[in-house]
Image (cartoon, rainbow, N blue to C red):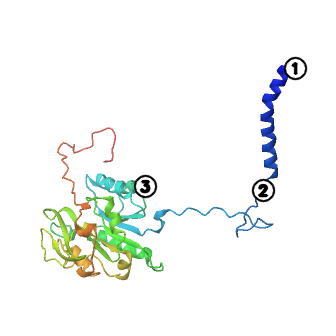
Amino acid sequence: MKSLLFSRFLLLLPWVLIVIIVLDMDSSRAPLPALSPRGGAEGGSGGARPPAPRRRPEAGLPTIYAITPTYSRPVQKAELTRLANTFRQVSRLHWILVEDAAARSELVTRFVAGAGLPCTHLHVPTPRRYKRPGLPRATEQRNAGLAWLRQRHQHLPPPQPGVLFFADDDNTYSLELFQEMRTTRKVSVWPVGLVGGRRYERPVVENGKVVGWYTGWRADRPFAIDMAGFAVSLQVILSHPKAVFKRRGSQPGMQESDFLKQITTVEELEPKANNCTKVLVWHTRTEKVNLANEPKYHLDTVNIEV
């Protein structure tokens, strides 16, 4: 019996010694002083400095302002949905959506409320006399977007980093395009796909400068470029308060040139998209919807917004 107890004692003895040593080491350690906000030991006043909030990488990015004219038609919501799905993936983008209407429509108002991105919803009607075929479109809506942008920033001190571009609701955009345009210093340009009766149009670049235009229509235009093919620095917009899209004397296809002539020259243009050799935006017009079987009067038991 004694030998059994003795053997158990010998088995437990090493573990007892380990516990005693550990307790002795912990009791001999001195507690470290807490640091005060200035890096010293904590005193009677003041406490530990809270950790600094981690700054988001996009916080210093210039805001991209996208002006989009839109009008009522069967594919309007579908077009805006595709555009919103792209814009939601772009950091620091503010959407300026301008309806061609005397009042905000319920459809677009509901859409904006659920779009999930910063958006300003404006409206201005196109005068009836300017709705004839062959006349420039969306002039009043783009100008309303410019007026809102200038009014918003007129009392803020410079510099105000930002970039503006005109995003028609029937275009398709690569996310890479927004990375390209965000570094615009004055006016930047790039190719546009599926426009002018060609697979693409583009500025011709030599030694980093625009020297001409590859286009299928009126290459003699001062700026032979599509509305989707350029971006403008916010500072340029603010420093040229009278630069707008003109109605009087303007011809179809000349709105881009009429506007850009007021703020820049061809020599000052900044080529993007690998010296204008990559297409990052496409003028993908939606085909005309076939509603031949749509009843004249609503026959369904529910009213569905399309």
Real-space Cα distance between discs 3 and 1?
81 Å
CA neighbours of label 1 inside 10 A, class few (<14), some (14 to 19), many (20+): few
**Foreground tag (3 vs 1):** 1
- Residue type at numbered disc 1: Lys
Element assignment for label 2: loop
Q: Which numbered disc flags the more N-terminal residue, 3 or 2?
A: 2
How many badges with numbers are in the image? Answer: 3
Give left or right: position of 284 versus 83: left
Point 19% across, 46% down: residue: 291
- Residue 18 x %, y %: 77, 39
Point 78% across, 56% down: residue: 31
In the rendered view, tell whether residue 303 sits above or below residue 265: above
Q: Which numbered disc flags the more N-terminal residue, 2 or 1?
A: 1
Residue 251 visible in the displayed image? no
**Foreground tag (3 vs 2):** 2
Mark 3, residue position? 116
Mark 1, residue position? 2
Disc number at residue 31?
2
- Residue type at numbered disc 3: Gly
Real-space Cα distance between discs 2 and 1?
46 Å
Point 42% across, 70% down: residue: 62
CA neighbours of label 2 inside 10 A, class few (<14), some (14 to 19), many (20+): few
Please tell me which residue lies in front, 92 or 112. Answer: 92
Q: Quadrant of residue 35?
A: bottom right
**Foreground tag (2 vs 1):** 1
Real-space Cα distance between discs 3 and 2?
51 Å
Question: Which residue is at the far top?
Answer: 1
